[in-house]
Amino acid sequence: MQRKIVISLSEFYHVYNRGVEKRSIFTSKPNYERFLKLLYLANGTNPYRYDEVKNTPLKNINRGNPLVAIGAYTMMPNHFHIILKEIVEGGTAMFMEKLTTGYSGYFNRLNDRVGSLFQGTYKAQHADYDQYLKYLFAYTHLNQIKLIEPNWKENGIKNIEKAKEFLKHYRYSSYQDYIGIEREENLILTKDEFPEYFLSVFEFEDFTKDWLNFEYKL
């Protein structure tokens, strides 16, 4: 199927995909941890064998030159979102191929299944103006609140402090990286390739707080 938009060098995109028939693609902690590591490993020009580096810290893995710059991401039980910038011609396609193929092979072997895991090729939206790109940082980082309040976007959040605490401890997104938590996964992001929307942790927290208090429909 032909993609509706053309991925261009130095442009920003929201890329995402979900499980075929909306099935869960992350069903356990090891699933999430595998995908997290693949976000780093797949974003490089060097080939790799996962079994050879699975216990190696990210900082000690030579993945080669990055294919894209990743600004934000989140993983949900049946889908994922990534905000990225193409920094190598064709880098987005190469990165997404390595990421989804690597994860699909692992998931299928683990669950003794065959066939496609994802709903076709990845989807992409061009973040072609500044306000939309900034909005995507909110959308991506707050997406996981649906796990504790499924209708929060329509009805508002019942307990803001509970939601903030949930976000703070949710490992499977880049939210922790923006609130100053030091962790290995900091290396997944290349923040300096994106506009400086958040010059400090406080600015990012104010930004997300505004969205947590805002009722909106997508």
Image (cartoon, rainbow, N blue to C red):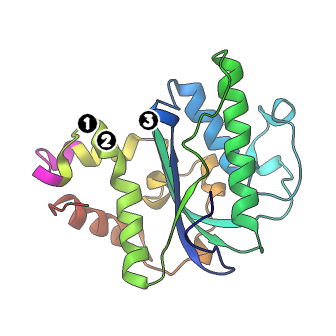
1 or 3: mark nearer the eye = 3
Ranked by sequence position, the earlier of labels 1 and 3 is: 3
Q: Does 193 sit above or below residue 116?
A: below
Q: Does 193 sit above or below residue 42?
A: below
Q: Position of residue 84 (x, y in %)?
A: 59, 66
Residue position for label 2? 166
> Could you say which quadrant of the image residue 159 lies in?
top left
Q: Quadrant of the C terminus?
A: bottom left
Q: Extreme front residue here?
A: 1
In the rendered structure, does residue 201 fall within the stretch colored magenta?
Answer: no
Horizontal relation, residue 92 to residue 195: left or right: right
Residue position for label 1? 148
Horizontal relation, residue 149 to residue 170: left or right: left
- Name the kind of residue labelled 2 in the image: Phe
SS of the residue under disc 2: helix
Q: Residues within 10 Å of mark 1 (few under 14, many from 20)?
A: few
Q: Are marks 2 and 1 in contact (CB under 8 Å)?
A: yes
Q: Residue at x 65, y 19 (%)?
A: 113
Instruction: Answer whether residue 190 is visible to the viewer in this image.
Output: yes
| Foreground of the two, 215 or 176 | 215
Residue extent of the magenta highlight: 154-162
